[in-house]
Amino acid sequence: MDIAAFLIDIDGVLHVGDRPVNGARESLRALEERGYPYRFVSNTTRRSRRSLAERLQGLGFSIPENAIVTAPLAAVALMKERGWTRCFLLSTGDVHRDFEEAGITLSEDEADVVVVADAGEHFTYERMNAAFRLLAEGAALMALEKDRCWMGSGGLMLSAGPFVAALEYAAGTRAEVVGKPSREFFALALEQMDADFETTAMIGDDVATDIGGAQACGMQGILAKTGKYREDAVRNSGIVPDLVIDSIADITDHL
Ligand SMILES: [Mg+2]
């Protein structure tokens, strides 16, 4: 394969729940030794970039914070570009830190934009309704991801997508998706390593977001059969990955 650089998904590729994928660490080291640059692109919106790096460290990966590109950071960049300073954030964990540290005001009453992360148990009726009212008053809608589900330690979990779809339906609007598979998001990560779409491959476990998204931008899509991978989901997607590997541990066999 003609590949000069990699974008690598985190959840489902480097680890599944609290378990690191066997051989993942070694394969990252092997890529490095062979001179392939890579960046990590994650739609995991339950953590700030700093705490994501710390969690990966806890799982045995030494990945510097600045090698990780996340959707919250992409949202912050877009807000700054547009002069939006106030945001209603539907999220959980410490993802609010990425916004606060960038000088964004988090507000429940007045907002230029409603930003939807994977808020897990915080997707209550009350919070969803507050978001809906702001949208009805004219706030824009941004989704940090629109995945249907993700694979937790105990089974499949609803992701942000179904809740984004509910708000779109209620407010009669369309969300701007700023995480994967948005072209701007991938471009942000490529910029950092001076790579281009044509010679970059994306390794992921989500056939639609990772593989379909990468291919739509002209990248190669490599599907790892770990995490949320399911054979029937691939068949029904109509997407044909450029390569399917059992896990990221096998990537160097194909270079
Ligand atoms: Mg994944």
Image (cartoon, helix red, strand yellow):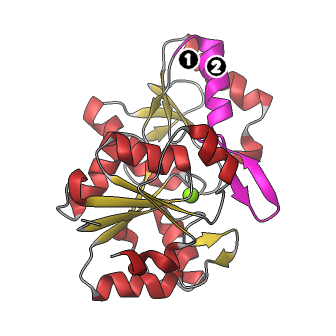
Q: Is residue 205 visible?
A: yes
In the image, which residues are magenta? 147-173
For disc 2, the neighbor class at 10 Å (few under 14, some 14 to 19, many from 20) is: many
Q: Residue at x 58, y 43 (%)?
A: 117
Q: Quadrant of ligand 1?
A: bottom right
Q: Quadrant of residue 202?
A: bottom left
In percent of width and height, residue 141 lies at 50, 25
Left or right of 17, for residue 138? left
Q: Residue at x 35, y 36 (%)?
A: 79
Which quadrant holds the C terminus?
bottom left
In percent of width and height, residue 77 lies at 32, 44
Check residue 56 for magenta coloring. no
In percent of width and height, residue 96 lies at 53, 50
Q: Residue at x 53, y 41 (%)?
A: 145
**Residue occupying the far left of the picture:** 194
Above or below 24: residue 233:
above
User: What label does residue 132 carry, if any?
Assistant: 2
Q: CA distance from mark 1 to mark 2?
A: 5 Å
Q: Is residue 99 visible?
A: no
Nearest to the observer: residue 61 or residue 132: 61
Nearest to the observer: residue 136 or residue 33: 33
Does the Cβ of the disc 1 residue fall within 8 Å of ligand 1? Answer: no
User: What label does residue 135 carry, if any?
Assistant: 1
Amino acid at circle 2: Phe
User: What label does residue 75 carry, if any?
Assistant: none
Contact? badges 1 and 2 (CB < 8 Å): yes
